[in-house]
Image (cartoon, grey):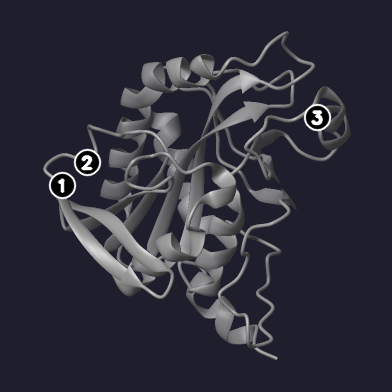
Amino acid sequence: MKIGILYGYQMSDVMKKSERIRVHTPYGEIIVYFSTLGNHELLFIQRHGEKANLPPHRINYRGNIQALASCHVSCVFSVGTVGSMKSAIHPGDLVIPHDFIDATKSRPLTFFEEQRVHVDMTEPFCPSLRKILLKCCKKINNITVHDKGVYLVTEGPRLETAAEIKLYSRVADIVGMTMVPEVVLAREKGMCFASVCLVCNKTAGLQKKLPVDEIVSVYKNKEPLISKVMQQVIWSLNEKQACDCPSEVSKAVV
């Protein structure tokens, strides 16, 4: 099975002996790192570009997802950091989101610019992949995992105001800047998609300041556990997932 992994911070234990390849897409050239684990082929993309310098609103989302589709990837995992808007979700916890709210403003959101295609997002994250993720997380010690969460996607690159958090915390649990349009584009390409979110801070109004070095520090501390989760998940995957993700786009054409 070919498995895609989108990441923002390094996962050294999973990306061992990777080969750098170039994938040409209509949206530009994408650098993909290729490796194997067991019978699976792994394709890693640093979502922020090879230099990891692109802010969330300038990420080449369509290029990244198209590159994975062109490589015939069937499952995509998004690994990222988020802030918590809830008192019960703490820095260092993992959240496996089940839904999202899109508050982005200016980024391309679809592959279908000349065609009426309306993909169903009732269940935006693959239920089969979510089940495997949760099962693997719960097998590992020293991990607190939340099996549901609504992910608020903001435009960035600024962080949210306390008033925004107060408003959105009524309907969402965590906040980040990259889930949309990744999850939408993957659905348009018929790929299963699930996310592992590491909580790195409380949001504005729930802690006094939001220093960026705090996010980096929490991630570095938890990187070995995240890598362990991803390795367990990859070993657990079968060639065929029990879901309808691959066929959803065929039902969406007007």
Q: In the rendered image, which residue does mark 3 sit on?
A: 165
Name the residue at the bottom extreme: 254
Image point (79%, 27%), residue name: 161
Quarter holding the C terminus?
bottom right
Image point (88%, 34%), residue name: 167
Up/down of 245 relative to 170, above or below:
below
Q: In the rendered image, which residue does mark 1 sit on?
A: 18
SS for tag 3?
A: helix
- Location of residue 31 in the rendering, given as x and y in whole percent from the top left corner: 28, 56
Up/down of 95 relative to 128, above or below:
above
> Are the residues flagged by discs 2 and 1 in contact, CB closer than 8 Å?
yes
Tell me which amino acid carries mark 1: Ser
Q: Quadrant of residue 157?
A: top right
What separation in Å lies between label 2 and label 1 (alpha carbons)? Answer: 6 Å
- Location of residue 68 in the rendering, given as x and y in whole percent from the top left corner: 36, 65
Relative depth, front residue between 43 and 123: 43
Q: Is residue 120 left or right of residue 24?
A: right
The earlier-in-sequence mark between 2 and 3 is: 2
What separation in Å lies between label 2 and label 3 (alpha carbons)? Answer: 35 Å
Q: In the rendered image, which residue does mark 2 sit on?
A: 15
- Location of residue 86 in the rendering, given as x and y in whole percent from the top left corner: 74, 24
The count of marks equals 3
Image point (60%, 70%), residue name: 110
Tell me which amino acid carries mark 2: Met
Q: Residues within 10 Å of mark 2 (few under 14, many from 20)?
A: some
Up/down of 155 relative to 39, above or below:
above
Relative depth, front residue between 5 and 120: 5
Quarter holding the N terminus?
bottom left
What separation in Å lies between label 3 and label 1 (alpha carbons)? Answer: 39 Å
Residue 37 visible in the picture: no
